[in-house]
Image (cartoon, grey):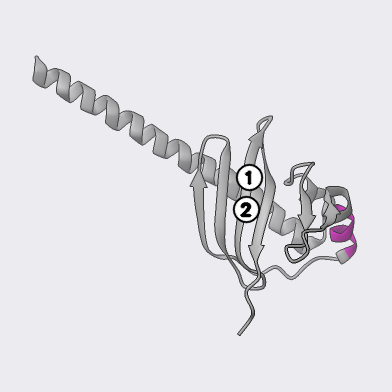
Amino acid sequence: MRTVLAFSTAALLISVLSAGAQNKQAIQKEVEVVDAARVEALKKGDGNAWGKTIADDCLWVNMATGEVEQNKTERIKSISESGGLDIRPSTDVKYHVEETRVVQTGASPRSGQFARIYVKDGGVWRMIALYQENVPSE
């Protein structure tokens, strides 16, 4: 009887852990889709499409001065007026996944290391914060 109970408990634990891993993979895939849409909007200069991937209260702050450079509305306008940006693929991208929060880290060829934070709000994933550490080019 104890053997059956031990096997049943082990099977249940493996099932729960497996479901958790599958759920994290599904969440990561959802965020990958949103991030790809964000990048594509930047490439096309489509500020409105880009804005759908960003939280309304997101601000762009100059890391050197600490001053707010743009709010979301101003950023949408500048992206729309840009005519599109030359975005290069990020490298070494990793995801740290929770149920309603995802931190995406990696390196950008132009702006160095980054961390993007995505939050699911009202069933929609949006970036709420971005930190970039500019690395001098060699």
94 lies above or below 4: below
Q: For the view shown, which residue lies furthest in the front direction?
A: 65
**Left or right: 58 in relation to 24:** right
Mark 2 touches mark 1? (CB < 8 Å): yes
Q: Secondary structure at mark 2?
A: strand
Q: Nearer the viewer, residue 63 or 26?
A: 63
Q: Is residue 77 magenta?
A: yes
Distance Cα–Cα, label 2 vs label 1? 7 Å
Residue at 84%, 50% (x, y): give it: 71
| Residue 126 lies in quadrant | top right
Q: Position of residue 31 (x, y in %)?
A: 59, 46
Mark number, residue 62: none
**Residue 51 belongs to the span the image colors magenta:** no
Residue position marked by numbered label 2 in the rendering? 116
Q: Secondary structure at mark 1?
A: strand
In this picture, residue 34 sits left or right of residue 79: left
Q: Hey, what amino acid is under mark 1?
A: Tyr
Which residue is labeled 1 in the image? 118
Say which quadrant the N terminus sits in.
Answer: top left
Residue at 42 percent of width and 38 percent of height: 22
Give, as a single range, the part of the protein colored magenta.
Answer: 76-81
Furthest residue in direction bottom, as rendered: 138
Q: Which x, y percent locates residue 63? A: 73, 63
Disc 2 marks a residue whose amino acid type is: Arg
Quadrant of the frame with the C terminus: bottom right
- The quadrant holding residue 89 is bottom right
Q: Nearer the viewer, residue 135 or 79?
A: 135
User: Which residue appears at 16% of the width and 18% of the height?
Assistant: 5
Q: Quadrant of residue 19?
A: top left
